[in-house]
Image (cartoon, helix red, strand yellow):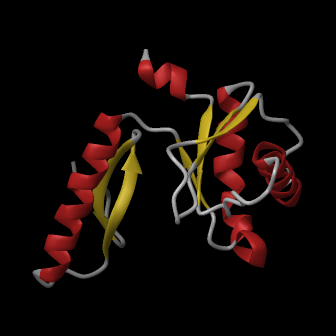
Amino acid sequence: MDRQSRSRNIILFNLPDLSTSSDVHNNDVSLIDEMFNIIGISTKPLSVHRLGKPSSKPRPIRIVMPSPPDVFQILKVKRQLLNVDKFKTVRVSSDQTLQQRKLYSSVASELKTRKVAGETDIFIKFVNNLPTISKNGQRAQQ
């Protein structure tokens, strides 16, 4: 159930948090509209919320979209943001459960260990929505 409820969500990291602004929410919505225009997304989000308490670092933003295909479309074209100076540092991710984040973290630490041990040309690849370590030119390891 948790994965289903998260399937319409996107999480944005490193989007500037202008806490000095009197209307933070409207500022966030206008930044997201600008970002969506750049990557060619015409669908409007259902809701936009900052996560966590205000701090010195920008808080993540959860965006709820009308349907999961809208989320998939955004994830497909998110690389276009790297070409725009204003959004170059923004990271776009699907909303993941704690279990999904732990699994990715364990695979990432295994990757780091294997690279320190001398393996080269290995990276994390998603196979059937599961993170696996793969080597360039080979199929993913299970």
Taking depth in this image into account, of 106 and 27 the one nearest to the observer is 27
Residue 113 locus on image (x, y percent): 14, 72
Q: Is residue 114 above or below residue 1?
A: below
The reply, left or right, for residue 39 in relation to residue 82 is right
Q: Nearer the viewer, residue 62 or 106?
A: 62
Residue at the (38%, 34%) spot, across then down: 97
Q: Nearer the viewer, residue 9 or 131?
A: 9
Residue under the image location 35 percent in, 73 percent down:
136
Residue 31 appears in the rendering: yes
The residue at the point 89 percent across, 54 percent down is 37
Image height of 32 relative to 88, above or below? above
Residue 115 location, x and y as percent? 20, 78
> Which image quadrant is residue 63 in?
top right
Q: Position of residue 11 (x, y in %)?
A: 58, 45
How far across and down, in percent of the image, does residue 8 sit? 62, 29
Residue 141 in sight in this render: no
In the figure, is residue 33 to the left or right of 20?
A: right
Q: Residue furthest top?
A: 1
Residue at 73%, 60% (x, y): give it. 20
Quarter of the image for the N terminus: give it: top left
Q: Is residue 34 left or right of residue 124?
A: right
Figure label count: 0
